[in-house]
Image: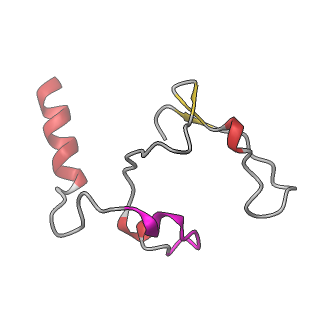
């Protein structure tokens, strides 16, 4: 969750545990009318973590077209070595 911050109250009821005004990206409050790009595993996009909100998103890559993370990391760290 690079650059993302928020407050969490586990005592609040589900759906109200993270106050919207507390959600920030690089210290800037999110804009509810704006679209954001999120990188996550397909497992979460399909709602298998019991949160269906990511199902509403649009896939930029899926497991058929996405490059494997091990190759991305190898290329990134290989350039630094």
In-image side of 61 versus 52 (left or right): left
Residue 40: percent from left, percent from top = 39, 56
Q: Which residue is at the front of the view, 16 or 68?
A: 16
Q: Extreme right residue here?
A: 11
In-image side of 70 versus 42 (left or right): left
User: Residue 40, can we see it?
Assistant: yes
What residue is shown at x 49% (from left), y 31% (from top)?
3
Compared to residue 71, the image places residue 49 above or below, namely below
Residue 21: percent from left, percent from top = 70, 37
User: Which is the main secondary structure of the residues drawn in magenta?
Assistant: loop
What residue is shown at x 87% (from left), y 56% (from top)?
11
Residue 70: percent from left, percent from top = 22, 52
Looking at the rendering, which quadrant does residue 36 occupy? Answer: top left
What residue is shown at x 50% (from left), y 75% (from top)?
48
What residue is shown at x 42% (from left), y 46% (from top)?
35
For the C terminus, the quadrant is top left
Compared to residue 5, the image places residue 52 above or below, namely below
Q: Which residue is at the front of the view, 78 or 32?
A: 32
Q: Which residues are magenta?
A: 48-57
Residue 59: percent from left, percent from top = 29, 62
Residue 1 inside the magenta-drawn segment: no
Count how many numbered circles sit on residues in the image.
Answer: 0
Q: How is the image coloured?
A: secondary structure
User: Residue 81, can we see it?
Assistant: no
């Amino acid at each position: 969750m690079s650059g993302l911050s928020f407050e969490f109250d586990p005592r609040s009821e589900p759906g109200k545990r993270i106050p919207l005004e507390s959600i920030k990206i690089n210290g800037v409050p999110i804009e509810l009318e704006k679209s954001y790009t999120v990188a996550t595993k397909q497992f979460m996009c399909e709602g298998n973590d019991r949160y269906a909100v990511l199902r509403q998103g649009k896939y930029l890559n899926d497991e058929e077209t996405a490059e494997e993370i091990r190759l991305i990391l190898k290329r990134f760290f290989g350039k630094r070595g």
